[in-house]
Image (cartoon, rainbow, N blue to C red):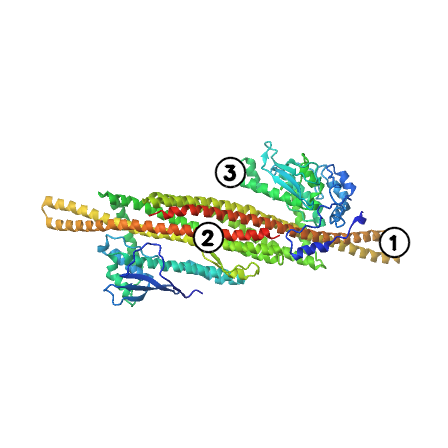
Amino acid sequence: MMGYLSVSLQPRAVNVDLQTDATLQVDISDALSERDKVKFTVHTKSTLPNFKQSEFSVVRQHEEFIWLHDSFVENEDYAGYIIPPAPPRPDFDASREKLQKLGEGEGSMTKEEFTKMKQELEAEYLAIFKKTVAMHEVFLCRVAAHPVLRKDLNFHVFLEYNQDLSVRGKNKKEKLEDFFKNVVKSADGVLVAGVKDVDDFFEHEKTFLLEYHNRVKDASAKSDRMIRSHKNAADDINRIASFFLKVSELFEKTRVSTLLRWLCFVLFHLIPAQVKVEQLLMTDVSSHLLQKIEARVAADEDLKLADLLKYYLRESQAAKDLLYRRGRALVDYENANKALDKARAKNRDVLQAETSQQLCCHKFEKISESAKQELIDFKTRRVAAFRKNLVELAELELKHAKGNLQLLQSCLSVLKGDT
Amino acid sequence: MADTARDPPPEQTDFQELEDGEDLFPEPAAAPESGPASLPAEDVSTNSNGPKQDSLFDDDPEDLFAEATEEVSLDSPERDVLLSDGPSPAITPITPPTSVITPRIESLTVPVSLQIEEEEGGDSFDIHIAVSDPEKVGEFSGTFWHLRDKQDSSGTSLSVFKQGEFSVKRRFSDFLGLHSKLASKYLHVGYIVPPAPEKSIVGMTKVKVGKEDQSSNEFVEKRRSALERYLMRTVKHPVLLKDPDVLQFLESSELPRAVSTQALSSAGLLRMVNKAADAVNKMTIKMNESDAWFEEKQQQFENLDIQLRKLHASVESLVCHRKELSVNTALFAKSAAMLGNSEDHTALSRALSQLAEVEEKIDQLHQDQANADFYLFSELLGDYVRLITAVKGVFDHRMKTWQKWQDSQMLLQKKREAEAKLQFTNKPDKLQQAKDEIKELEGKVQQGERDFEQISKTIRKEVSRFEKERVKDFKSVIIKYLESLVQTQQQLIKYWEAFLPEAKAIS
């Protein structure tokens, strides 16, 4: 049923505030959803001399984005930067399952119900699709906006090379290796975090980020639950409205019928999902009313906040990773110092110890310098993103509430005046 | 019997009013008021609470209720027995003498306050009954509900009741007793008697034990509003309003304990057995429906029943989910507040705390909305599901009446055949006996036919009244519901408008 879905997307207002300039502009201009993968068309406009053309497009899949992200993480030179978090894997499983179930249950429900549910599920699929495209685009934009990362060679290859990058997903062995690496890393992270930092700025950031990250995680989880409840209530209202419609058909040609259809109409409109009704057909009541209603899955406003929280969950994790790397470098530096002292005391391998100490010192200072700026930028970005999001949230809520209010009031005046 | 006073009922006008669908609130042509001045004396005299109706009602030839009172008088011998001067007898054949045991379980009594207002034109009067919160009287005798009846003074004195405003205490079992009396009197002649609220052993025990928690408060409130709706429906029915039992229920300060209403009594068991027997019988009666109207209506009610039940289930699920939503919103609010605390940018921190507050208020809104959903819709639908069961019961009674009529007709046929045979034998006394039996049977057959026609007519009237009432009911509930939604939206607007400047102030 949903074999192919192609969406043309305009440059969108992403929920992350970014400074884009003409020297390098990246966006995802098109996306195609096939059976089990999504193909993104990455479109680049650039005035930089590194590229052969000033404007070009390539097709990339999710694995290639992950490859790019991992190459950043593994690059020692970028240890002092917050690596933009990788986009989450496109996950249409739940949606596909529902569509399948719907197809199976087609015989058991009325044509109206079926069409309506199909429309809803398609809308849901579309929403998830749009979201995943947005996430991938944000990643690319962040990289393009970063003064150092944008010059990365892998990034340029990613943008320009119009053949398949032959990047395969990790096989089982590699996934297992990753798993162990993570375990070691988190244990180490605990050790490193325990070391008190002389620098107040970083010490403060450490405590702040830890707490912030946890709270964002909690808020994100709670907002998801809230959305689910909202959706359940919306489903119920949907069902109730259909029943009212059916009941009204039983009272044909009586005033009760019209009454109930008004109620239907109101309910459909007020479903916490955003419901658009194309036409007010109250004088001519017909089942077209159902078909003209397009329901989206959860309120736009809910999703915005939830998405923002999820994104900052990942970003704050990336910031924590930066701090970890710095902490690690600090520990290495301090260890190198100790080793140098020991070597000097024993007067053995002093030169070696000295070089090693120099290296560690240099690495640590480099990371510290860029980390400070990165963290400050992170805060600025965060504040701006939240501000934008909260303002939009409030404005959307107001728009909906005012619209609903108007609808309800006109309904009421019709009902009350109608005797 | 007083057949002479019977007027041909103007049934056509009634149905026109319904089918046109023009008028949501058609005023039945002065019908409810015009009670018969010719209320048979027997009824009035035997009832010590006798309503002084003569002065009230105009003598209206179009009086539909002439028949109603005819009905009453037709079976008045039975009526006398049923008038509640003495202990209320069970209608079921066996009156278990042991069932005088105080029903501990359902002795939650209800204050009911009744307000009678008469509209200007004297066309219809509104009785307002308010059921107030229950109070506990005594440790074991259970709680009493207060029943307050009020009358606003107006031009014509409405003297259905002795006083204008009064207050009585009633127990839950009294309500059930009233219902069972009314059901026995009126159901089998075709009146749709509003069903009483259901017993709930679990809920009751909780309240009795004295648990002062959310669920028992909810239970009390639920029961209170159910009782109020029940009484309002009962008194809205013009015939039931004049019923002496109803009047006594509303007026007299002491009511004899209703027996045979316990859930677990032998009378209860007997009722269940009877119900089962009825169900079996229903399946075996095959009626030749000559009247298409009945067939159509019956089908309609069947469908309505199914739809309403499904709708009711959905609304209950909605109430559940909204409560869940409210809980989750509260949790999110707390989480957002925490996030605001850890945020070190002051303006953003403040905005996040504001967001948390807004969400908390919204959670309260959801809670209130859930209550509205419940009390307005869910309960209404539940009532209607039960009402439709009563309507179906009335249709069933009609079938039974028809059956009785057919049976006696068949019996008559047999007796006639027997008599014909006897003609040829030389047994004069047997012949005479046969002739007598035939005469009796003929009377029965005629009676059966009349009963059947009567019940059919009554049902038509009742159904049309029911449909009008239903429209009124739904309309008023829908309006209330929409108004509650309006309120919610207005509140939402207020909250978000207060939040917006805070969000914009982040820099």
Instruction: Please state which amino acid type lies under the numbered disc 1.
Output: Leu
Q: Position of residue A309 (x, y in %)?
A: 36, 50
Label 3, secondary structure: give it: loop
How far apart marks 1 and 2 lie (CA) works out to 88 Å
Question: A9 above or below A266?
Answer: below
Viewer-nearest residue: A124 or B22: B22
Pointers 1 and 3 within a single chain: yes
**Residue A24 visible:** yes
**What is the three-letter code of the residue carrying label 2?**
His
Disc 3 chain ID? B
Q: Is residue B430 left or right of residue B26?
A: right
Element carrying mark 2: helix
Q: CA distance from mark 3 to mark 2?
A: 37 Å
Which residue, as the protein is rendered here, is positioned at the far top?
Answer: B138
Q: Which residue is mark 1?
A: B431
| Residue B262 placement (x, y as % from top left) | 63, 40
User: In the depicted view, which residue is nearer to us: A406 or B451?
Assistant: A406
Query: Are there few (<14), some (14-19), or many (20+) residues within 10 Å of tag 2?
Result: some
Q: CA distance from mark 1 to mark 3?
A: 76 Å
Q: Quadrant of residue A248?
A: bottom right
Q: Which residue is mark 2?
A: A400
Circles 1 and 2 on the same chain: no
Which one is earlier in the sequence, the residue at label 1 or at label 3? 3
Q: Position of residue B296 (x, y in %)?
A: 66, 58
The kind of residue on which mark 3 rests is Asp
Q: Which residue corresponds to mark 3?
A: B213
